Amino acid sequence: MKVEQLVEPDRVHKHVYTDQAIFDAEMEKIWERTWVYCGHESQVKASGDYYAVTIGRQPMIMVRQGDSSVQVLYNRCPHRGVQLVGNLHGNTGTSFVCSYHAWSFHLNGTVRAIPLAKGYEGTRMTRDNPDCGMKRAARVDSYRGFVFASLVDEGPSLTEFLGEARIAFDDMCDRSPVGEVEVVPVCHRVMQHSNWKFFMENQLDALHPSVTHQSTGISAGRVEKRIKAERGSAPLYYHYLSTFASSFEQWDAVQTINFPYGHGILKAYMGLRPQDPDTLEHEALLVKAYGAERAEEYLSRSIHHVLVYPYLSVQSPLQQLRCLRPIAPNKTQSEIWHFRLKGAPEATYRRSLWYYNLVNSPATMINADDLENWAKGQWGLQSNGGDWVSFHRWYGDDREENGVTYSNHGTSEVVMRNQFRAWTQYMLA
Amino acid sequence: MNKIPSSAPQAIPNAGPDFERLLGQEVVIEATQGSALTGAQSIEPDHSPRASQAGSSAQVRQLPRAGILSRTSAEADVQREVEQFLYLQAELLDSKHWQAWIDLFDAQGVYWMPVMPEQIEWEGSPSIFAEDKLMMEIRKGRVSHPNAWSQAPMWETNHLVSHVALESVSDTEICVRSRFHMMELRRDSVRHFGGRYQHTLIRGNDGALRIRLQRVDMFNGQASFDYVLQIWV
Ligand code: FES
Ligand SMILES: [Fe+2]
């Protein structure tokens, strides 16, 4: 089936989730072309620090250079192809050295030494041949410390690609009095037995929480209520969980904003400004750094999630980020990170940490049920019980202005419709 | 593929007149003695040693000591009592008696699964579990709810606890470490989790042991999780 036949404005064919040929085409036309998130600069602080990342199907290395820039290289020895780093992260000193025949490379990928170089004289594989160096990602750029790479020369710049979704990183960094975040060096990895699109669609699906997460929301709400009755107030982190049981009406009252390239925002103020001394201390620091007006703007942003399509889900008010690395049509690795606001009080960090521990850890009481949905979703779509996936809720109801679509209802499936608009553009390009 | 006709005589190819002489020589490839650089190092003197590989647990961990030896029968009783307590802890989990399991903890009891063995504080650093009794109550309530969707498929666990080593014993507090292996069945597949328990046990006025801290260091806690953990390990 052709791409044009798979995607209609209000529904898509199940093959886009299940078909190996479609998956391969996605890797080629989307993931290995567009800007893909590699990591945060603070993951590779010192010269020689590296992180192995996957872009589409390509094993890459993000590595800090001697001149403090960050480079992204293919994890492949130009001699006979062996991967140059064998673990997820580390420090490689001043060079990469191949474990097979000791070809070595500078941190920017250019060749440094070839053993028995004499043996190559008169061949086309002498060290002046650029093919003797490690291949680099065609483009590397960063936005507020978040590093992205694109494996092709042409296409929009990183800023053009991110567009309004830049707010994910602005909102995170602006909450620091020095405008920067630093990664907490823990990455939880959780395998999803589902197509990557399930996760991306789910993140702005405002109808599902009170269905999928009701067991946790209700259980947490019960305990929260009791603590409030006993002590007058309950710590914010109970609210993180109980809020998942909010009513359909509440979720329907929020708004999604849907951008070009499939990006989007779920608005909804997260209620992170109780008037306790810790919160007030943090807010005072921002006022001091940015002035009252801008500090207020930063603190009152109504953002729940920002999606950078097709792989990032950012909860900027709590400095959390999840990144997808697709493996197969029915298999997706997710990487889960969180960040510290530089210069902010420890208490502000601890508040976000609770969210990381409760919602994003591999013992999460929330995503346990999401993962179950996505796996069952994948199995359902692999069946012959039907060919189409419906995105009809509030179809025709949204408001579009200059390529940006605003939902009138939080539960509008415009999120998915907008993602597939971008998907089709990528796939037909 | 070229097939050798089976009828053709299969001669060993002639290596030439030098062959005999070559075979007669003893060629030994041996490491250079002394400080001379060898192999890859002669090309890349800084090849080795390289900076530590952060991904490969280069950190030196604490040297384990043998547990306290029971010298009297009273001490042997404590060892057995603690062992039975740890077995019960595991069996309550495997039999899904969540409230009875929570009741093993004292009022300030904490269940903690850190991300890395170097962590020392249950609050303030990223954890896989960091739960006081209220949070345990939420988790219990969640898995017991009729619409805990992820609990619908067949789901069982089986713990083995061993290597029970007493680290310190007083009238009021016992520190003990042990090893566990948990197999988990979900749908039709089995996952394995293993690691170390470190229990701080308090002896109350009633003489019974209660858990003040159950620290669980999973050896595969930073490997990719195939699905997530729903209940305590
Ligand atoms: S494959 Fe890397 S040096 Fe030979
Ligand atoms: Fe969810």
Image: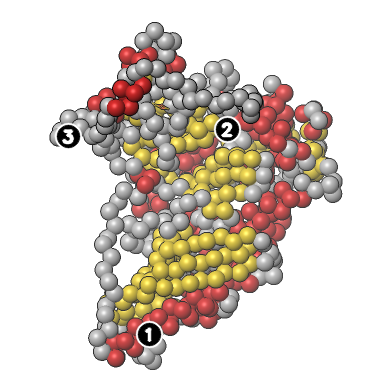
* Ligand 2 under 8 Å from disc 1 Cβ: no
In the image, B98 versus A256, the foreground residue is B98
**Marks 1/3: CA–CA distance:** 56 Å
Q: Residue B174: where, in percent of width, then height?
A: 32, 79
Nearer to us of marks 1 and 3 is: 3
At 39% from the left and 49% from the top, the residue drawn is A282
In the image, A149 versus A417, the foreground residue is A149
Tell me the element at label 3.
loop
At 52% from the left and 61% from the top, the residue drawn is B192
Which class describes the residues within 10 Å of circle 2: few (<14), some (14-19), or many (20+)?
A: many
Up the image or down, B202 lies above or below A344; here it is: below
Task: Give the labeled residue for mark 3.
Answer: B33
* The residue positioned farthest toward the top in the image shown: A122
Up the image or down, A356 lies above or below A52; here it is: below
* Ligand 1 under 8 Å from disc 3 Cβ: no
User: Toward which corner of the image does residue B205 lie, by quadrant?
Assistant: bottom left
User: Toward which corner of the image does residue A333 lie, by quadrant?
Assistant: top right
Task: Give the labeled residue for mark 1.
Answer: B80
Task: Give the labeled residue for mark 2.
Answer: A56
Q: Amino acid at mark 1?
A: Arg
Q: Going from the N terminus, do you reach mark 1 or mark 3 first?
A: 3
